[in-house]
Image (cartoon, rainbow, N blue to C red):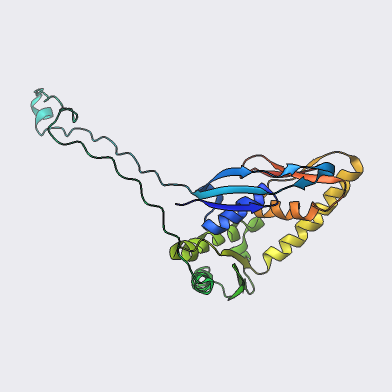
Amino acid sequence: MEWVETTGNTLEEAKEAALDQLGVAEDDAEFDVVEEPKQGLFGRTRGEARVRARIKPSTPRGKTERRPRREKGAEKSGERREQRPRTNSRNSDRPAREPREPREPREKVEVDPAVVGQAATDFLVGLVSAFGTTGDVKVHREEGEIEVRVEGTELGLMVGPGGATLLAIQDLTRVASQRRLGDQDSRLRIDIAGYRERRREALSRFANKVAEEVKETGSARMLEPMSSADRKIVHDTLVEFDGVSTRSEGEDPRRRVVVEPA
């Protein structure tokens, strides 16, 4: 798989943009940090984050060695038959197998975003039916960004605790549409029952409240582990908040935001 290069205000934002282009989850991608934003005065950052990413190459499984078959009648008769010495494949007359050539990277193709949106819609319509509920699936496109929304009632099962099921459905939809069609340019997002907007508003209020406490007490505050999308909301909310700065630490899925005095 060829590398893609993306930028963002933070490393998390640049990685999220790369995942959107590749259409995979973070565990299925590998990253190479090209450039990190530099820390400036008063907690502000200068420059931008730049990363290279690609889908992790699949490694073929090694073949398990077979046990030699037991010859019939050997146990019954009690006789111990002489085992033939194994022939070393290196010494046999069989020609050595040539090493397998690496796969050629998938060729980048131009895909109409409308086709990607339709493929995502078809997949989600079937998924809604499989969940045993009802809902309308609508596509909203703006340049290279595609948002497919599932609207209706009793869709909580498709959202899941903290939006976990929604994120899994988004990954599946990207595979069923973007990766199947070879699209690497569109940014595809899924929203169900308006969860993303409600989550953004709730996280923004929470982030501002934490920032006020940090500013008053002068003590840093470590938030609970969050997804990359939620961490981005916190970073974006507090980027213009005077007196505090934010950073992320830890490894996924336990990576979290730290809000500290600037």
Q: Give the quarter of the image for residue 222.
A: top right
Number of numbered discs: 0
Left or right placement of residue 118 versus residue 201 in this view: left
Residue ID at (22%, 33%): 67
User: Where does the C terminus fall, quadrant-wise?
Assistant: top right
Q: Where does residue 149 sit, x and y in percent of width and height? A: 61, 71
Left or right placement of residue 201 versus residue 69 in this view: right
Q: Where does residue 203 sit, x and y in percent of width and height? A: 76, 56
Image vertical order of residue 203 relative to residue 192, above or below: above
Res 227 seen here: no
Q: Where does residue 108 sit, x and y in percent of width and height? A: 45, 60
Q: Nearer the viewer, residue 170 or 232?
A: 232
Q: Give the quarter of the image for residue 199.
A: bottom right
Residue ID at (18%, 31%): 89
Q: Residue furthest right?
A: 216
Image vertical order of residue 196 relative to residue 31, above or below: below
Q: Where does residue 238 sit, x and y in percent of width and height? A: 80, 52
Left or right placement of residue 137 versus residue 79 in this view: right
Res 245 seen here: yes
Q: Nearer the viewer, residue 203 or 174?
A: 174
